[in-house]
Image (tube, rainbow, N blue to C red):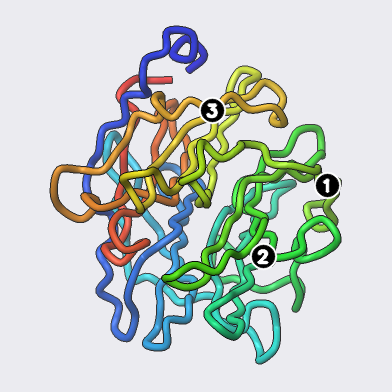
């Protein structure tokens, strides 16, 4: 991994096709996939589907991971529904990251709340994940990271790393809304915060990654992988002068605070045709038996489901 940064060659991700194609009765999409090791070659996978009212619900499933394949097993189970009226997650719950710490599993999720005129809020909640029973239980009725003096619009935490009981998160914080001829456009970027318990956070000022130019205005879910003293981040970003949809970019850091962005190293792009030919977004990178994997979404923000890519080199 570190040598690839030195040589400047793209990471050799090899696409392995769809893992989940939305076929759950009454739901569409399969976005924001996450995975965490359970036992042997079995993982717990969570992802987000939308109901007829476009409200997001979180589903859980077991999956086997072996070689260059992931296979979901059994029927996916709806495990976290939108919250009560008026709560931060009343219009949807979106899975973003699973964290294991001191024998417990936590799912961080984004709670969605619609505002008038097409605006919205998305703040961060936390739920306890029972890997034995494939169930989720919200720890709090409100967010653990949300709108405050540092985050006036929203705060959607998506990537985590724990070192010596210090929790780090890289999260999307809203910067501004701008009225355009097509409606309101949201501007948001990746920020950093620290905590000693994963619940109460101290947010650092400023963006971890600046916008590339005047055309880029949003970053999708970042995923951070730590190895040999280096943080590796894959993230979704949009747009460019000629491309309005998401692509996956890459950055690296020695301390998790100052990042060197180099999208040419990301190593994955849209396909010439098929389910991920229009966009790729919402990466989630994880390791199993020395092999690095990436779950990601394609066209329509997960409308076509989610797929798997495998790094072509053993780590």
169 to 150, vertically: above or below: above
User: Which residue is most to the front?
Assistant: 181
Residue ID at (40%, 77%): 50
Q: Nearer the viewer, mark 1 or mark 3?
A: 3
Q: Secondary structure at mark 3?
A: strand
Residue 125 lies, in percent from the top left, at 69, 67
The part of the image, by quadrant, that contains residue 75 is bottom left
Residue 224 lies, in percent from the top left, at 57, 37
Q: Secondary structure at mark 2?
A: strand
Residue ID at (80%, 58%): 199
The one nearer the camera, 220 or 26, is 220
Q: Nearer the viewer, mark 2 or mark 1?
A: 1
Residue 12 lies, in percent from the top left, at 31, 24
Sequence order check: which comes first, mark 1 or mark 3?
1
283 to 139, vertically: above or below: above
Where does label 3 land, which residue?
A: 261
Q: Secondary structure at mark 1?
A: strand
Badge 2: how crowded within 10 Å, few (<14), some, or many (20+)? some
Q: Between marks 3 and 2, how big is the CA–CA gap?
A: 33 Å
Q: Is 227 on the left or on the right of 73, as rendered?
A: right
Where does label 1 land, which residue?
A: 195
Sequence order check: which comes first, mark 3 or mark 2?
2
Where does label 2 land, which residue?
A: 128
Q: Between marks 1 and 3, how big is the CA–CA gap?
A: 25 Å
- The reply to whether residue 25 is visible in this rendering is yes
């Amino acid at each position: 991994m570190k040598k690839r940064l030195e040589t400047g060659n793209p990471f050799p991700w090899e696409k392995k096709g769809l893992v989940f194609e939305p076929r759950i009765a009454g739901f569409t999409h399969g976005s924001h996939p996450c995975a965490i090791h359970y036992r042997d070659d079995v993982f717990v996978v969570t992802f987000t589907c939308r109901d007829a009212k476009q409200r997001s619900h979180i589903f859980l499933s077991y999956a086997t991971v072996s070689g260059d394949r992931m296979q979901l097993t059994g029927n996916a189970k709806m495990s976290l529904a939108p919250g009560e009226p008026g709560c931060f997650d009343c219009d949807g719950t979106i899975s973003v990251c699973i964290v294991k710490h001191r024998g417990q599993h936590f799912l961080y999720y984004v709670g969605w709340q619609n505002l008038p005129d097409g605006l919205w809020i998305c703040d961060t909640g936390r739920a306890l994940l029972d890997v034995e029973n494939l169930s989720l239980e919200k720890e709090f009725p409100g967010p653990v990271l949300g709108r405050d003096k540092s985050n006036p619009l929203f705060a959607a935490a998506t990537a985590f790393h724990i070192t010596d009981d210090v929790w780090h998160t890289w999260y999307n914080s809203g910067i501004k809304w701008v009225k355009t001829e097509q409606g309101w456009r949201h501007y948001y970027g990746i920020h950093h915060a620290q905590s000693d318990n994963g619940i109460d956070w101290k947010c650092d000022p400023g963006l971890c990654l600046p916008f590339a130019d005047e055309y880029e205005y949003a970053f999708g879910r970042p995923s951070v992988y730590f190895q040999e003293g280096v943080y590796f981040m894959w993230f979704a970003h949009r747009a460019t002068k000629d491309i309005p949809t998401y692509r996956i970019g890459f950055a690296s850091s020695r301390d998790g605070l100052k990042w060197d962005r180099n999208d040419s190293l990301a190593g994955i792009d849209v396909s010439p045709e098929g389910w991920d030919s229009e966009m790729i977004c919402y990466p989630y990178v994880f390791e199993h038996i020395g092999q690095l994997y990436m779950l990601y979404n394609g066209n329509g923000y997960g409308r076509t489901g989610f797929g798997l890519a495998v790094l072509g080199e053993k780590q």
